[in-house]
Image (tube, rainbow, N blue to C red):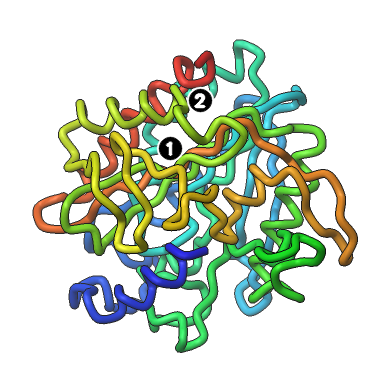
Amino acid sequence: MRRFLALALAACSAAKPESRSTPRSDAGFTGDGRQTVSRLFRTFGTLAAERGWIEETVYVYPEEPGLAIRAWRTPQTGPALWLIAGIHGEEPAGPNAIAASLDRITALAAAGVPVVLVPLCNPKAYRENWRYPNTADRDWRGGGYSVGDSEHLLPDLESGTHPRQPAPPGPESRALAAFALRLAREYPPRLALDLHEDELSTTGGYVYSQGAHATDSPTAKRIVKLLIDSGIPLRLDGKTRFGEPVVDGVVSKDDAGRPIRDGSIDELLSAATVFVDGAPRAGPAGRTVIVVETPTFGGTRLADRVAAQKAVVDAIDTLWRE
């Protein structure tokens, strides 16, 4: 994923001293006002305890069995809303926004909409305020890998006849991608939202749009308006630092005018074809896959970023009906 790799490389030189800290307390890093991992999971755990949702452990850290990647889903299956956040540990707005908007999500589910929720995909890095689960070094060349990397399941960029990479970069990546492929059979992604942040953006946030309706997506346009109305700085035109054109706040093409192919779990959910054990098969083919990137520069406090992403999640009923 280009934003996984290029952003990580630049971030290692631009990160603030606070974001480089690697606290070891039981509570974990809370210097920016984020909720702890345990508090977040207590909130999300009410979905199973009080709402009858199905809770699943996606991955358990072998060196720390009490820490795990967890997911929740509704008993009802079918074309589904997927909500993902916390792929990178130093991007806390998404998990905190989902926790603050849980009532909106459960209301949509109570109305009969199937939902798959993976609200904190990288709890180990979130707890330490790292980017990656395996190192405090934000330069990917130092060995860091993304839990959302799915290139081992995605077609190569030239011929499309074999997987882009022979293996996943880490065990969390393997587990999360396998979970997504398995659940997508019963919960095909009709709308997927992945909540991210961009600490290197100096002009504002933006939205990535992938899937069958990537270009001119009404959902992407509505999310841009929600972010603008929230007061968060947003970039509406020009190009990203990767050369991708920004059109009215939305990025739907790469620097060569092709669909976004970044190797992420977002691409996986939108992919029409995937490779399993080296053989091609039909992919999730998500209709609308949106990545929200709120900026973390200057005066954009975490509370403001959470409020912006909460505005998106709070509008989930409207977004679902687009």
Location of residue 227 in the rendering, given as x and y in whole percent from the top left corner? 27, 33
Q: Compared with residue 43, is residue 242 higher up or lower down, i.e. above or below? A: below
Q: Compared with residue 220, is residue 245 higher up or lower down, i.e. above or below? A: below
Q: Looking at the image, do the residues carrying marks 1 and 2 touch, with CB atoms under 8 Å apart?
A: yes
Toward the front, the furthest residue is 256
Amino acid identity at mark 1: Ile
Residue at the location (28% across, 26% down)? 225
Location of residue 51 in the rendering, given as x and y in whole percent from the top left corner? 62, 25
Residue at the location (9% across, 52% down)? 299
Which mark is drawn over residue 73? none
Location of residue 246 in the rendering, given as x and y in whole percent from the top left corner? 32, 45
Q: Is residue 45 visible?
A: yes
Report which residue position mark 1 lands on. Answer: 98
- Residue placed most toward the observer, 147 or 40: 147
Q: Is residue 46 visible?
A: no
Report which residue position mark 2 lands on. Answer: 105
- Residue placed most toward the observer, 95 or 212: 212
Q: Compared with residue 70, is residue 26 higher up or lower down, i.e. above or below? A: below
